[in-house]
Amino acid sequence: MKYETIEIQTGQGVGLIWLNRPEVRNAFNETMIAELTAAFSALEADPGIRAVVLAGRGKVFCAGADLHWMKKTGEFSFEENQRDAMAFGAMLNRLYALKMPTVARVHGAAIAGGMGLVAACDIAVASTDTEFCVSEVRLGLTPATISPYVLAAMGERTARRYFLTAERFPAAEAYRIGFVQDLVQPGELDTTVNAILGHLVQGGPGAQTATKDLIRSVAHSAMASGLIADLATRIATARASDEGKEGIRSFLEKRLPSWIAVAGGKKAQRKGAKSAKKRN
């Protein structure tokens, strides 16, 4: 499939999606939303993809909504705006629910919907030059569509400040509040992301999918008897699976599990072998 607003590169078990509208600071429009939705589905359907990275071409990661798109939505009816917002919300949820791990590579700026993309990823790495902003209230709007993901990433108390003030805050603050997990110099951004990917491709793909579902299920659940039973069922299912059995066998036999050899190639095999030696 040919894309107008994004670019996809694949290799070594990784799908790299570039937001590719640098002339407008990678701002969203309806075309980019549709193309991102299609790209997420295409990568998830590819059995060779173990992780997805989301990045931005040019000077910033994503500056939020495209001005021309915003002008057009201002002339929409309620029903048209609802359909438009549903498309954006569905795209974010598609990213959030991907079966494989996702990493946001963030630089320059992540504004409004751009923050939604970062928050919907499992892991976020930002360069020290990045600025963040939930800017909607200054436009007389609310950050409704991105709110579930950004709230989960920064917490309710912090969200109250940044949702209501719409002030910009630096990467150091994003790291302090837990919105991003790693903060690095601009020149170290790719090295850090690649190091994380090196760890991710060593995990069992089925186990990672199940673990993502586990996190979503447990994050806001009370520790009641029903939850305890559900967790017991989840681990029993994992232990009884072919992947679980292979993982345990490979550990006991002091060898790499089959999924590393398939997904990571010789480099990952060497790295995995070193890790296996260290742990044994």
Image: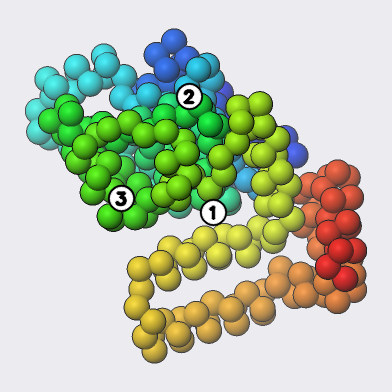
Measured in 3D between alpha carbons, the distance from the residue under mark 3 to the one under mark 1, in whole angstroms, is: 29 Å
User: Mark 2 near mark 3, Cβ–Cβ under 8 Å?
Assistant: no
> Looking at the image, is mark 1 or mark 2 earlier in the sequence?
1
Image x and y of residue 26, in percent = 43, 21
Residue sitting nearer the eye, 90 or 166: 166
Residue highlighted by disc 1: 99
Give SS at disc 1.
loop
Residue highlighted by disc 2: 108
Q: Is residue 179 above or below residue 83?
A: below
Quadrant occupied by the N terminus: top right
Quadrant occupied by the C terminus: bottom right
Give SS at disc 3.
helix
Res 158 label? 3
Image x and y of residue 43, in percent = 57, 40
User: Disc 3 residue type?
Assistant: Thr
User: Disc 1 residue type?
Assistant: Lys
- The residue most toward the bottom is 225
- Left or right: residue 87 versus residue 271 is left
> Looking at the image, is mark 3 or mark 1 earlier in the sequence?
1
Residue sitting nearer the eye, 13 or 169: 169
Query: Residue placed at 60% from the left, 36% from the top?
Result: 184
Image x and y of residue 208, in percent = 61, 60
> Looking at the image, is mark 2 or mark 3 earlier in the sequence?
2
